[in-house]
Amino acid sequence: MYPTDGLKIGNLYRLGFPGIAARVIDPPAGIERSSEYCYLVESLVLRSRWWVNRRGEPDNIYSPHLIVPAAQEAPSASWTTIGQR
């Protein structure tokens, strides 16, 4: 896992389905994961697990995506100069 990414193990995130949430969990020992889809997500309501990337996109088309809060970044210098004109 990468500590600077938006997803954190143990946190709940909303899904693309209304009213349903899923938790990012630790993968079981001995499971190989791809470098891009490195987060295991579990939903008790849907009774399933699937892999997602740091943007919350699933590794297959049948799994829902996570709604990940946007990272707070400082505005670039070009935007501040345009806004000041």
Image: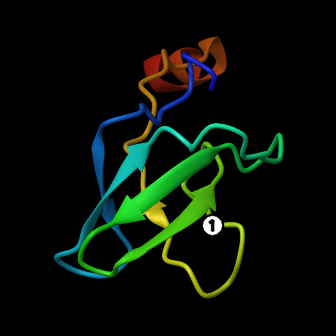
Q: Quadrant of residue 38?
A: top right
Residue at 35% x, 68% y: name it.
15
Q: What residue is pinned by disc 1? A: 58
**Farthest-out residue, bottom:** 62
- Above or below 40: residue 44: below
Q: Nearer the viewer, residue 30 or 26?
A: 30
Q: Quadrant of residue 35?
A: top right
Residue at 48% x, 32% y: name it.
6
- Above or below 84: residue 61: below
The local secondary structure at tag 1 comes to: loop
Q: Is residue 63 left or right of residue 83?
A: right
List x then y, in percent, for residue 13. 31, 52
**Farthest-out residue, front:** 30
List x then y, in percent, for residue 75. 51, 19
Q: Is residue 3 left or right of residue 47?
A: right
The amino acid type of the residue labelled 1 equals Pro
Residue at 45% x, 17% y: name it.
84
List x then y, in percent, for residue 29. 63, 37
